[in-house]
Amino acid sequence: MVMMDTINSVLNWVVPPASLVMLAFSWPALTFINTCEWLYYSFLYHEDMYNKVVIVTGASSGIGEQIAYEYAKKRANLVLVARRDHRLHGISENAKRLGAPHVLIVAADVVKEDECRRFVNETISVFGRIDHLVNTASLGHTFYFEEANDASVFPILLDINFWGNVYPTYVALPYLRQNHGRIVVNAAVENWLPLPRMSIYSAAKAALVNFYETLRLELNGDVGITIATHGWIGAEMARGKFMLEEGAEMQWKEEREVQAAGSPVEEFARLIVSAAVRGSANVKYPSWYDVFLLYRVFAPDVLTWTFRFLLSNQGVRATSFMGTGRPLLEASSPPKRLLTGGEPRTTQHMSPRLQLRQLDE
């Protein structure tokens, strides 16, 4: 035991600087290899999606909807999955106008394994194959952890952000393997960058990214995996968010689903689909967020001091309406209904400050 402690103490001093020196010497070679790979995948490799079959979960709004349109332009057959099937009908028509030969609509809850198995079986029954599985269902929040006086919301966040990706992958994987298909994952920079008021969301995204990076090694190239990571890319990311109205129940804001041409969401969707058909392992938007990774690894205290400084200037903490800055009522309120698509999930005694926003689904 003493010997092991001594070895670890020595390695703690030797390994970090030695690794930095090795990285410095290998950096030119790594840059050359990465450039060659980028040139190959950008100009020589390109998967033809014509008549291929793509399942898009969380397709009723946001990134999922825009990704469906991008695949439609490549003339892929689409399977659109979401809880709100009434939204999918209009999206289906738009996708057909953009070039999708056939579009199948399935109303399902991705956090339930049996419903995931149902829409995968329907896909096989109709098309006989699955080429791409795109998981975009995601649910974010903007509350301080200590302000949530109802812990029942925590598993809801974990279910949608983690199990809502794992279950579709689990049931679709055998069919994806048959065609050397691809899984596309909607992640977020919060999986490694700690941001205040997003503790549960960040934990779920970290688990999600680690799961798929491990799965990538297990599959050994038989099924490709593209992990798409976004930062905060503008107000369009808050379309379809959940808001706690003053004196009202938590409800879906349909008016926030109006599409904006040329929005960051559309640009992110284009990057995701382009990366998927090129066979890229990762896509990031915007890419400048990566600079914070250096601080996270080599100078984590800098991030801590930065966030503490920003929080110290906020004064009294109060969760606000996203995009309006209006604080929520401090008084108690009746039980709220949490919507995760088109159907309500009821939570008792939800904090009046609690605000959830749905990024996609």
Image (cartoon, rainbow, N blue to C red):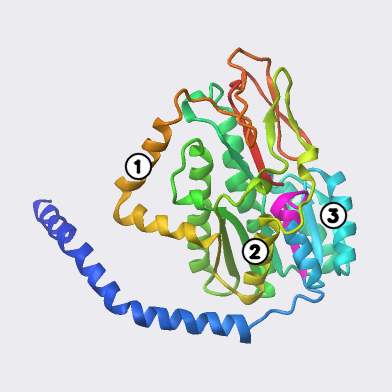
- Indicate which label's residue lies in the foreground, 1 or 2: 1
Mark 3 or mark 2, which has the lower sequence index?
A: 3
Which residue position is annotated with label 3?
91
How far apart marks 3 and 1 lie (CA) works out to 43 Å
Q: Which residues, given as a range, are shown in magenta?
A: 53-65
- Give the x, y percent position of residue 172: 68, 61
Amino acid beneath label 3: Ile
Q: Are marks 1 and 2 in contact (CB under 8 Å)?
A: no
Q: Which mark is residue 173?
A: 2
Q: Quadrant of residue 337?
A: top right
How far apart marks 1 and 2 lie (CA) works out to 40 Å
Q: Nearer the viewer, residue 6 or 85?
A: 85
Which residue position is annotated with label 1?
304
Magenta span has 197?
no
In the image: residue 31, left or right of residue 360: left
Q: Quadrant of residue 245?
A: top right
Q: Secondary structure at mark 3?
A: helix
Q: Secondary structure at mark 1?
A: helix
Amino acid beneath label 2: Leu
- Give the x, y percent position of residue 334: 68, 15
In the image: residue 151, left or right of residue 177: left
Q: Are marks 3 and 2 in contact (CB under 8 Å)?
A: no
279 relative to 115, above or below: below
Considering every residue shown, the one lying at the far bottom of the view is 44
Considering every residue shown, the one lying at the far top of the view is 331
Question: Which residue is depicted at the point 35% across and 54% down?
Answer: 295
Q: Which mark is residue 226?
A: none
Question: Which residue is depicted at the point 60% across and 12% down?
Answer: 331
Magenta span has 62?
yes
Amino acid beneath label 1: Thr
